[in-house]
Image: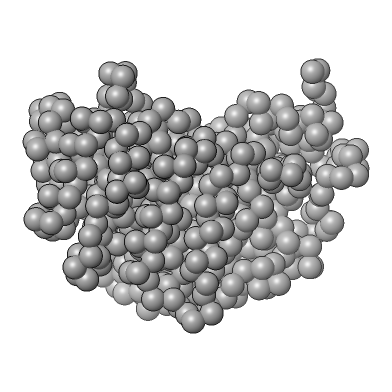
Amino acid sequence: MRLSSTRLGRANLDRLPPAIRRPTYDRSRVTPGIVHLGLGAFHRAHQAVVIDDCLATGATAWGIIGASLRSPDTRDALAPQDHLYTVAVRAAEGTEHRVIGALLDSVVAREKPAALVERMTDPAIRIVSLTVTEKGYCHTPQTGDLDERHPDVMHDLNNFDAPRSAPGFIVAALARRRAQGLSPFTVLCCDNLAANGHTVQRIVAQFAALRSKDLGKWIADTTAFPCTMVDRIVPETTDADRDAVSAALGMRDAWPVMTEPFTQWVVEDRFSAGRPDLAAAGVELVTDVKPFELMKLRLLNASHSALAYLGYLAGYETIADTMKDPHFARLAARVMEEAAVTLTMPVSTDLAAYRASLLKRFSNPALHHRTWQIAMDGSQKLPQRLLGAMQDRLLKNLPIATHALAVAGWMRYVTAIDEQGRAIDVRDPLAGELAALAREAGPVAERLAPVLLGVTKVFGPLGAEPRLREAVTAALGRLYSEGARRAVEAHVSA
């Protein structure tokens, strides 16, 4: 198939096929109101779509300036096409395409950090949102506190006007706004952190206090950090995806994003300097996000991680492939069932229906979400996704064998050697440390499990809990003796 050499852009939107949705508003009238840190696929398939809907209602002061903290790839792909891009919504019935216009410009923070701080200082910017993944906050996941010894934190404390980290950029811009007598922007975290707004407020205030106690207090007292829960599955875009989208458009889109029909955004309605009409775009504005956050972390994210680690070890490339195995589908369902008893939800919440919807979403054959991709950064994800539910079940004297099998899957995965003796490309901030511990312990569950449970950055004091140690060690032993497929089959059939 020969693809058009014409590039998607402002000048040729009218040449798109009629079935392709596109901005219905005049982009030339849109001005920036949001700076977004972490210009990745998830933001472009989730928050940017919501803002695109807001702009379509006439709220033209809420365009987005995107910032990649490190890589220029997204900027380089989108700038030549006026920062327009396609969201391809894939379901078993077919794919719908929509061109998004909410992103007005993008910057690469590492290239010109002062320029990004200047953008964030602009009084027109009233929201700074973030999707920088758990590891991007330079914190200790078990405590939720700033890691003062993190290399980026140490750099930023000595280069206040040329930061590298997300907390460093936020503090530098807020400090400048304070000095200029400007009101603070809202910091809107859209990452999977426990109590994400409160956690980011603590991290940012702690960072600021290392520069000036007065600055730290001012930020804590004046800046809104709403809690949020975000949910949409967004796989990595492949070259085949680019070709398929470009063929549908009749022109080239260098970096479209793939996603599913489902989307959810729950936001605590607490903003420092106003917001667009998010509710009109389908956002749930609430006073307490925590129940929804825990529901997503412990049902969706926990079962996703279990499928990722154990599915990868069993040789499955995608979540949909993994879900074709009925034993793994039952494993995902059991993770959700056992986590559900740790949740306290509003009476209107139908957890059984939510669990059923998750199993359907995981099975979507059109969504190629790789197990390897979901397995990334597990040391940062385990505390929120699996360990919290395990701790709560232990407090209720309930068994934890299902969650222990998922944790054991992570342990087997981070040894960086798969069941056939091949290397695993482990992407994790602690990858080197974990692999070194695994090499020293060897492939023996009774040695490896206690060593990894002793990594306090991941497990904290819970790693010393005898019942947890026993359950995880037993599960890891089964993975070594039987392999992931047989261990999962035996567990769900018991």
Q: Is residue 193 left or right of residue 72?
A: left
- The one nearer the camera, 185 or 484, is 484
- The one nearer the camera, 347 or 224, is 347
Residue 36: x %, y % from top left: 55, 54
Q: Can the viewer see residue 135? A: no
Above or below, 226 against 156 in this view is below
Residue 62 picture quarter: bottom right
Of the 4 image quadrants, the one containing the N terminus is top right
Residue 486: x %, y % from top left: 32, 34
Please name the residue shown 68% across and 30% down the image.
Answer: 242
Please name the residue shown 66% across and 31% down the image.
Answer: 241
Please name the residue shown 46% across and 46% down the image.
Answer: 329
Above or below, 121 against 4 in this view is below
Color encoding of the figure: one colour
Residue 392: x %, y % from top left: 25, 67
Above or below, 153 against 442 in this view is below
Q: Can the viewer see residue 4? A: yes
Please name the residue shown 47% across and 80% down the image.
Answer: 346
Residue 483: x %, y % from top left: 29, 30
Q: Is residue 214 left or right of residue 55?
A: left
Q: Is residue 452 left or right of residue 86?
A: left
Residue 449 picture quarter: top left
- The one nearer the camera, 331 or 192, is 331
